[in-house]
Image (cartoon, rainbow, N blue to C red):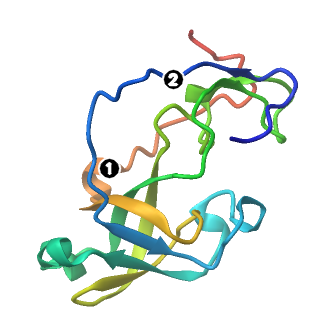
Amino acid sequence: MGEIREGEVSVALPERFDAGLHFIGRLRTPWATRPECPKNGLQSDAVCTVEVDPPYRPALSHVRGASHLILLYWMDRAERGLVIQRPRHADGPRGTFSLRSPARPNPIALSVVELIEAGPETLAVRGLDCLDGTPLLDIKPYYASTDARPDATVDRSGLGDRS
C-alpha cells in the first residue's frame, strides 16, 4: 500500500479473516490526505461530523447525556502488514504495538471526542484525527471514572521495553 522506510519490516497477512465487522457510519472531517491530518485529536479544534447509517440511528438515543464519547473506527487506507515501523519522530525502528500509528494488522483506531451536538442522524464532535470518509465501527460513552488512567506512562525512549 504505502512506502516502506529503511528499517521497517512487513509481513504477509493471513488469507482468511477471523471476524466480521459492520460499519455503522462514516466520519466526516476536513482532511483528505494523511499529511493534512493531525497526529492526534488534541492538535485540532475542527468540529467533525459522525454520520450514522439509518439502521443504527435508534442507538443514538440518550447519547447527548455524555460530554465525551469514544469512537472506534477503521483506518481503511492504512498499511496493514508492518510489524516494525520507523516513525519520523523516533530515533529508530519500533514495534507496531508500541505505536499509535494507523499502520497495523487490524487498523482500528480509538478517539475520545467531545460531543458538541447530538442530532437524530449525526453527531458533531471535536477531537478526531482521521481522514474524511473513514468507516465508523462503534460509539461508546466515555466515563472518566473508569476510562481515565492518570498514572499511566509510556517510556518513549524504548528503554522501558518489556518484550
Provide residue 77's location: percent of width, then percent of height. Answer: 59, 52
Q: Amino acid at mark 1?
A: Asp
Looking at the image, the residue that sits furthest to the front is 15
Where does label 1 land, which residue? 147
Where does label 2 land, which residue? 13
Q: Quadrant of residue 22?
A: bottom left
Specify few, some or many for label 2: CA neighbours under 10 Å numbering under 14, 14-19, or 20 or more: few
Report the Cα–Cα distance between label 2 and label 1: 32 Å
Q: Is residue 162 left or right of residue 92?
A: left
Q: Quadrant of residue 138?
A: bottom left
Is residue 141 something one can see in this rendering? no
Tell me which numbered mark, 2 or 1, is placed earlier along the sequence: 2
Question: Element under label 1?
Answer: helix
Q: Is residue 160 left or right of residue 125?
A: right
Q: Residue at x 67, y 71 (%)?
A: 32
Q: Amino acid at mark 2?
A: Leu
Q: Residue at x 78, y 37 (%)?
A: 87
Q: Residue at x 42, y 74 (%)?
A: 114
Q: Is residue 13 left or right of residue 62?
A: right
